Amino acid sequence: MKYDFTTIIDRKGKDASAYDSVGKIKWGMEPEQPKEGFDFIPMWVADMNFPTCPAITQRIIKRAEHPLFGYYNYSDEYYQSIIDWRKQDGFHEGLSREHIGYENGVHGFLSSAVQVLTKPGDHILLHSPVYVGFKEDVEGLGRHSVYSPLVRDENGVWRMDYADMDRKIKDFNIKTVIFCSPHNPSGRVWTRPELEKAMKVFQDNDVTVLSDEIWADLVFKGHKHTPTQCVNQWAREHVAAAYAPSKTFNLAGLVGSYHIIYNDKLRKAITRHGAKTHYNEMNVLSMHALVGAYSEEGHEWLAELLQVLEDNARWACEYIGKNVEGVSCAMSEGTYMLFLDCSGYCKKSGRTIGEVIKAGWNVGVGWQDGRLFEGPCHIRLNLASPKTRLEEAFRRIKEYVFI
């Protein structure tokens, strides 16, 4: 490969939450420090342990060589880079600058949108397992989460339960839905027919959809991301979507999300709220990072990254199937997360999921408690590390945890 996905980079002391928060309290979900004799392998925070695309760092360095960092304008190149990148798969017909707006993170977007579309005490529909941040976005604003569980079919594939979605929307008088596509933490890449069915439920109940599509670029072979807004004309007018280069190119520390909203009234309401808070201004280096990411070299780098991530996911699922009895997982179709169901093992062994998680932490396996994601006996793992690190982590899992 042209790019480096094998070097183990020491991130300790380099402002990395995945390392420097271990054993401390930042979010309240940090792994504990491993016992003596074991180094820590980060598999919790959803960032990657790979160096980002060189085009990004080169772009930042070039801008940093200019010694002034005063007030600035969003460049035409910034908007055109987003338009070209998002239209590469044949979707987002008619996308223009006016439909795009900067967001200070997907959580900032959701916070603004939830406050615009709902009032305290309202209920919002989400799927479970759920990304833990969505829960905080909803409940931290005094709204209430209502979960429609995803169900694994006879082949182990996570599916939406459309009847349950419809019933809960009606029972709780829900007018806003937070949707995740591709889905974190299950790794599902929804097909167009699945999205059409979901949009039919939402349309019949006159709800507005907030769609987190931050994982849109991380889709494996044989699968295709269909933007929620591009399913039909109704979705185009009733879905507000959030994107970012952060998951794709490992740029979370730079902060630089953006929304695409086609409906004029909805877009103005959300952007007006964000503007009034005075929080929603981009960092100039973040702008240049996005332009570097959404470049020709960015395409080339991403193609290699996807090969690495898919190989890691396939290897991990096969290893679990062969070596860990009572634990199951569905092969991810995208993202770099894996959601382990440990219910069979816990039932057979008599151990609780908390004990299993703690056993992993003891030997430096920095995985994440799936109960935070509404998985009752589950663990979430980040697979975006060099293969040698994964192999070592799974060796420890086999020898020290699932025994």
Image: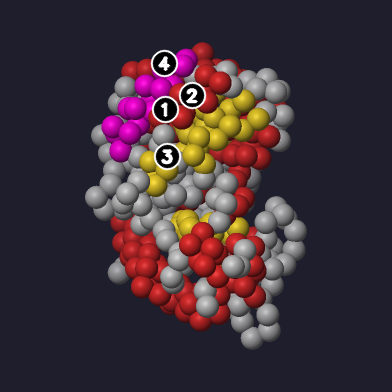
Q: Is residue 301 visible?
A: no
Residue drawn where x is 41% and y is 22% of the image: 201
**Residue denoted by label 3:** 181
Marks 1 and 2 close (CB-CB < 8 Å): yes
Left or right relative to 12: residue 379? left
| Residue type highlighted by circle 3 | Ser
Marks 4 and 1 close (CB-CB < 8 Å): no
| Residue type highlighted by circle 4 | Asp
What crowding class fits label 3: few (fewer than 14 Cα within 10 Å), some (14-19), or many (20 or more)? many
Marks 2 and 4 close (CB-CB < 8 Å): no
Task: Give SS at disc 4.
Answer: helix
Marks 2, 4: nearer the viewer: 2
**Residue denoted by label 2:** 167
What crowding class fits label 1: few (fewer than 14 Cα within 10 Å), some (14-19), or many (20 or more)? few
Q: Earlier in the sequence, mark 1 or mark 3?
A: 1
Residue 388 part of the magenta-drawn span: no
**Residue denoted by label 1:** 163
The x, y position of residue 53, in whole percent, is 42, 59
Query: In 3D space, how far apart are the residues under numbered discs 1 and 2 (Cα atoms)?
Result: 6 Å
What crowding class fits label 2: few (fewer than 14 Cα within 10 Å), some (14-19), or many (20 or more)? few
| Residue type highlighted by circle 1 | Ala
Q: Earlier in the sequence, mark 4 or mark 1?
A: 1
Q: Main secondary structure of the magenta part?
A: helix
Magenta segment boundaries in residue numbering: 191-206
